Structures are given as structure tokens and as C-alpha cells.
Amino acid sequence: MTAETTEVKESGDAWEPRIVAYCCNWCSYAGADLAGTSRIQYPTNARILRVNCTGRISPEFILAALDMGADGVLVSGCHPGDCHYTSGNLKLRARWALMEKALEQAGLDPRRVRLQWASASEAQIFADGVRTLVEQVKQLGPIEREWK
Ligand code: FES
């Protein structure tokens, strides 16, 4: 992975960021589904990956997504106190600052990642989180990768 760039390549098409969204099976994944069935409008940039619990997410997951082509990563899980595995989301929250440091050390702006809590009934919160992250990443521009 290489340093951040804020230059947006000029080409015929406007650049659109690619977002990986890791969603907890028990809450945000259902919230994302509800956003779709409720016809809540949000950017189509996110590719949703279901995980059993946000406690499964490690910095390596996020760095791997960014290394493999994502421009931003959203992690969305159960509210603190509602985790189906008791404290998985709390463990992730405790690791989050470390993960942001890992991003900085890799030369990436931590605004490329977002952690949020959204229950199965909070489709609007899920959609708003995607929109917020897409807007942030658009301001940062694409990641310039070594292999380009
Ligand atoms: Fe949803 Fe743990 S089960 S964050």
C-alpha cells in the first residue's frame, strides 16, 4: 500500500469510491436489507459483506479491503449492550483506535473508515452512514496503489 493521494484522475467518467461495508448479521445486515425494502435512497458504492459479529473485524480485514481495491470501509454493528455475543462490538470499539493508528502508519487517512451502530430497524441510520462515508472518501480521492 502506498501514500494517500488527493488527486482525482481526470477521465471521461467521474470517479466513484468503492466502499466495503462489513455488517453484523444480527443488526446492520438486516438494517441494510430494510433500507432496500423500504426504498431508502443511499449511494450504491457500498458492497456489503456479512459477518456474524463486528467483534470478528480486525485491522487486517480493513487493511486487506483497502489493499484489494476499496477506497473506504464501513463497519456497522449492534449497539453497545445489544451484541448477540455479549461484547464483540465492545471489543471492536476498543481496537478501533489501534486500527486508525495502523491506517495512519500505512499512509492512509483514518477518515476512510467508519464505525457505526445500526440495529435491524435503523435502516435510515445505516443509509446515512453509507452516505457520510462516501462523501468523506470522495473528498479524499482514490488511493494510489503501488501496482498502478
Ligand atoms: Fe452484532 Fe456482535 S452480534 S455486533
Image (cartoon, rainbow, N blue to C red):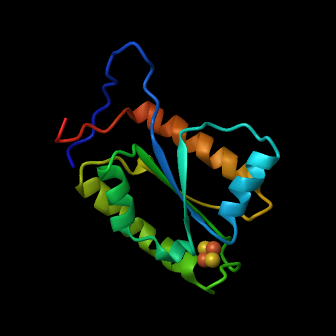
Q: Position of residue 116 (x, y in %)?
A: 60, 59
124 left or right, relative to 96: right
90 left or right, relative to 63: right
Q: Which residue occupies the extreme bottom position in the image?
A: 86
Relative to residue 44, is residue 102 depicted above or below? below
Write the residue at 24% across / 49% down: 107
Write the residue at 68% across / 72% down: 26
Quarter assignment of residue 137: top left
Judge whether residue 118 can be spotted in this image.
Answer: no
Write the residue at 72% across / 55% down: 33
Q: Which residue occupies the extreme left position in the image?
A: 146
Q: Position of residue 82 (x, y in %)?
A: 71, 78
Q: Position of residue 21 (x, y in %)?
A: 53, 54
Relative to residue 8, is residue 95 depicted above or below? below
Mark count: 0
Q: Position of residue 59 (x, y in %)?
A: 36, 67
Q: Quadrant of ligand 1?
A: bottom right
Write the residue at 63% across / 87% down: 86
Quadrant housing the C terminus: top left
Judge whether residue 21 can be spotted in this image.
Answer: yes
Quarter assignment of residue 76: bottom right
